[in-house]
Image (cartoon, rainbow, N blue to C red):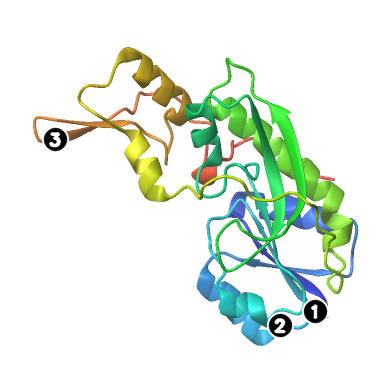
C-alpha cells in the first residue's frame, strides 16, 4: 500500500486530497493533525510512505524522517531568503520587492532541506499582509497541482535545484518582538509594522503602557486563519 501522510489544516484537507487522488486514484491519503498522529502513522508503516506538509507548523523530528524510504516534503510559504515563521510578515517589514514560495525536502533543521522548486512574484507597494498571504497561498496551490504527479510516486525523490537557502531563520521571538511597539515608536515605524503585521488571530500589534499590555484588535472581519492562509476556499482540480 502506497500512501501519503498529509500534514495540513482541517479546512484544506479535502481539497488537497482531491489534488493527489486526481492523479493517483489508488494512492491512500491519510491526515495527521498532530505530531503524535504522525508518529503513530509511521509506526504502522514506514515503507512506501511519504510525508507532505502544507500550511502546517508541525515539525517532523529527525528520527521519523530517517525511517522513511523516500524524502518528505514541505510547501514553505516564502522564498529561500525567508526561512522560518511568518515569512510574509518579515518580507513586508523589510520592504522587499519580491516574494515567493519554496518546495523543499524536510530536514532535521527547519527550512534547510534541498530545494525542489521556487516560484517568485513581485510585491506591489500597496499590498498589506492579507494581500500578500492570499497571493502566496494561491501560488502554493498552483505549485502543489504541478508537482502532485511527481509527489504521488512514493518511490522516486523529486529532482532538486541549485537554489539554496540564503536568509536567516526567523523565530517566534523575533516575530513577537516585531509585534510589540516600543514606547517611542514613530508614526512611520507604526505604519511599517502595521502593514507587515496587520490584525488577525496570530498577528496583532501590542504596546505596554502603565504596566498593562494593550492589543490592537479593531472590530472587523478577519479573512486570515491560523498560519496566515486566507479563508478563501482551496482551488480544486
Q: Position of residue 28 (x, y in %)?
A: 79, 71
Q: Which residue is mark 3?
A: 212
- The image quadrant of residue 91 is top right
Q: Tell which circle, 3 or 1, labels the residue nearer the N-terminal end.
A: 1
Q: Which residue is pictured at 76% across the width and 57% down the height? A: 17
Q: Which residue is mark 2?
A: 46
* Count of marks overlaid on the render: 3
Q: Which residue is pictured at 55% across the width and 28% down the height? A: 130
The one nearer the camera, 37 or 75, is 75
Q: Secondary structure at mark 2?
A: loop
In the rendered view, does 206 fall on the left or right side of 138? left
Q: Which residue is pictured at 29% across the width and 16% down the height? A: 186
- The image quadrant of residue 26 is bottom right
Binning the other alpha carbons within 10 Å of mark 1 as few (below 14), some (14 to 19) or many (20 upward) gives: some
Q: Tell which circle, 3 or 2, labels the residue nearer the N-terminal end.
A: 2
In the rendered view, does 187 fall on the left or right side of 48? left
Image: 134 above or below 157: above
Binning the other alpha carbons within 10 Å of mark 3 as few (below 14), some (14 to 19) or many (20 upward) gives: few
Binning the other alpha carbons within 10 Å of mark 2 as few (below 14), some (14 to 19) or many (20 upward) gives: some
In the rendered view, does 15 fall on the left or right side of 20? left
The N terminus sits in image quarter: bottom right
Which numbered dot is residue 117? Answer: none
Q: Position of residue 170 (x, y in %)?
A: 47, 47
User: What residue occupies the far left of the structure in this picture?
Assistant: 210
Q: Secondary structure at mark 3?
A: strand
Q: CA distance from mark 3 to mark 2?
A: 50 Å
Q: CA distance from mark 3 to mark 1?
A: 54 Å
Which numbered dot is residue 48? Answer: 1
Regarding residue 194, the answer to whether it shows in the image is: yes
Amino acid at each position: 500500500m502506497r500512501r501519503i501522510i498529509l500534514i495540513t489544516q482541517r479546512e484544506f484537507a479535502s481539497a488537497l486530497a482531491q489534488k493527489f487522488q486526481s492523479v493517483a486514484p489508488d494512492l491512500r491519503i491519510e491526515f495527521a493533525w498532530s505530531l503524535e498522529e504522525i508518529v503513530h502513522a509511521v509506526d504502522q508503516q514506514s515503507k512506501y510512505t511519504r510525508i507532505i506538509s502544507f500550511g502546517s507548523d508541525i515539525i517532523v523530528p529527525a528520527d521519523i524522517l530517517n525511517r522513511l524510504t523516500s524524502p518528505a516534503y514541505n510547501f514553505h510559504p516564502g522564498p529561500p531568503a525567508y526561512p522560518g515563521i511568518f515569512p510574509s510578515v518579515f518580507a513586508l517589514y523589510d520592504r522587499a520587492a519580491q516574494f515567493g514560495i519554496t518546495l523543499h525536502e524536510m530536514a532535521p533543521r527547519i527550512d534547510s532541506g534541498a530545494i525542489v522548486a521556487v516560484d517568485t512574484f513581485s510585491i506591489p507597494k500597496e499590498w498589506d499582509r492579507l494581500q500578500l498571504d492570499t497571493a502566496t497561498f494561491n501560488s502554493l496551490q498552483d505549485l502543489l497541482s504541478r508537482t502532485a504527479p511527481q509527489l504521488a510516486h512514493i518511490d522516486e525523490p523529486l529532482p532538486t535545484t541549485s537554489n539554496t537557502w540564503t536568509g536567516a531563520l526567523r523565530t517566534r521571538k523575533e516575530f513577537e518582538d516585531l509585534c510589540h511597539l516600543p514606547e517611542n515608536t514613530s508614526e512611520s515605524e507604526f505604519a511599517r509594522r502595521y502593514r507587515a503585521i496587520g490584525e488577525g488571530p496570530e498577528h496583532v500589534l501590542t504596546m505596554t503602557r502603565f504596566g498593562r499590555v494593550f492589543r490592537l484588535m479593531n472590530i472587523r472581519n478577519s479573512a486570515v486563519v491560523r498560519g496566515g492562509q486566507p479563508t478563501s476556499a482551496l482551488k480544486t482540480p
